[in-house]
Image (tube, coloured by chain):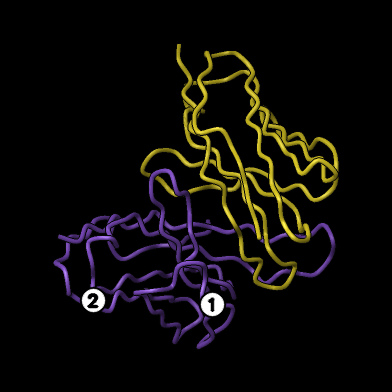
């Protein structure tokens, strides 16, 4: 079976750094996705990791440790617009249709 | 600009009604997905399709059916709506995976349909 765990909610201050963790248990591993979802909107793709290590993309970075079944999303220089839910997802297969299993998401509240 | 559109943003239906939710993508993607999103439960896959006329059950297919007659369009059907199907419904599409280790096919989501069944 598959299991993905994320904290339900986090709070942080504008300008700070926040780390959102995700742990997963899957039979087989085919990478890990992070999506951002603002309230009332569609999820949008942030990052994909399949190899261990840190992938940096501007203010956002994503880290993966396959041996620990662990990933985190690091958000630097937080802005108010970063208030959103962050969804961790793992694909079940590496076939053409990559069915995803999502965590329940972490709601991040950024305050002034 | 990639685009996935859904027929309605908000929909109110009565118990027992047949409900059609339409999704259209303009990216020539092979894969299309229907999810529902509920507080505390996250996104759950209802059905997906990897080609025209092909469909596969997701994790929670009971009470739903789908149709994919054209590549760009994927419809979700609630045969007889019930109150426990009140939810946010999200459609997504993605390309077929290329096959290399580091390749991936991100899913592009539509804006969602908030369905209320009374």
CA gap, disc 2 and disc 1: 22 Å
Pick the residue in front: B15 or B95.
B15
Residue A15 sits in which quadrant?
A: top right
Chain B drawn colour:
purple
Q: Are marks 2 and 1 in contact (CB under 8 Å)?
A: no
Residue B115 sits in which quadrant?
A: bottom left
Badge number at residue B80: 2
Q: Helix or strand or loop: what does disc 2 sit on?
A: loop
x, y percent for residue A24: 69, 47
Chain under disc 2: B
Q: Residues within 10 Å of mark 2 (few under 14, many from 20)?
A: some
x, y percent for residue A65: 82, 40
| Labels 2 and 1: the sequence-earlier one | 1
Q: Tell me, by letter, which chain the rendering colours yellow.
A: A
Note whether A31 is above or below A80 in the view shown.
below
**The C terminus of chain B is located in which quarter?**
bottom left
Locate residue B1 relative to residue A20 in the image: left or right.
Answer: left
Residue at image mark 1: B49
Badge number at residue A76: none
Q: Residue at x 45, y 11 (%)?
A: A112
Count how many numbered circles sit on residues in the image.
2
């Amino acid at each position: 079976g598959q299991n993905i765990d994320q904290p339900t909610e986090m709070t942080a201050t504008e300008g700070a750094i926040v780390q959102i963790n995700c742990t997963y248990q899957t039979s087989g591993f085919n990478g890990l996705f992070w999506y951002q979802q603002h309230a009332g909107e569609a999820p949008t793709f942030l990052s994909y990791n399949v190899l261990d290590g840190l992938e940096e993309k501007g203010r956002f970075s994503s880290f993966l440790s396959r041996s620990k079944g662990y990933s985190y999303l690091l958000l630097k220089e937080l802005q108010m617009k970063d208030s959103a839910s962050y969804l961790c997802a793992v694909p079940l297969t590496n076939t053409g249709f990559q069915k995803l299993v999502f965590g329940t998401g972490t709601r991040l509240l950024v305050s002034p | 600009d990639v685009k996935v559109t859904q027929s309605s943003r908000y929909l109110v239906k009565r118990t027992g009604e047949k409900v059609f939710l339409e999704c259209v993508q303009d990216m020539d993607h092979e894969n299309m997905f229907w999810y529902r999103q509920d507080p505390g439960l996250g996104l759950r896959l209802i059905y997906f399709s990897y080609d025209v006329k092909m469909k596969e059950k997701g994790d929670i297919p009971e009470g739903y059916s789908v149709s994919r007659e054209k590549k760009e369009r994927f419809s979700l059907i609630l045969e007889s709506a019930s109150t426990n199907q009140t939810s946010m419904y999200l459609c997504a599409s993605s390309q077929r995976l290329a096959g290399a280790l580091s390749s991936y096919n991100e899913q592009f989501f539509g804006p969602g349909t908030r369905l209320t069944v009374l």
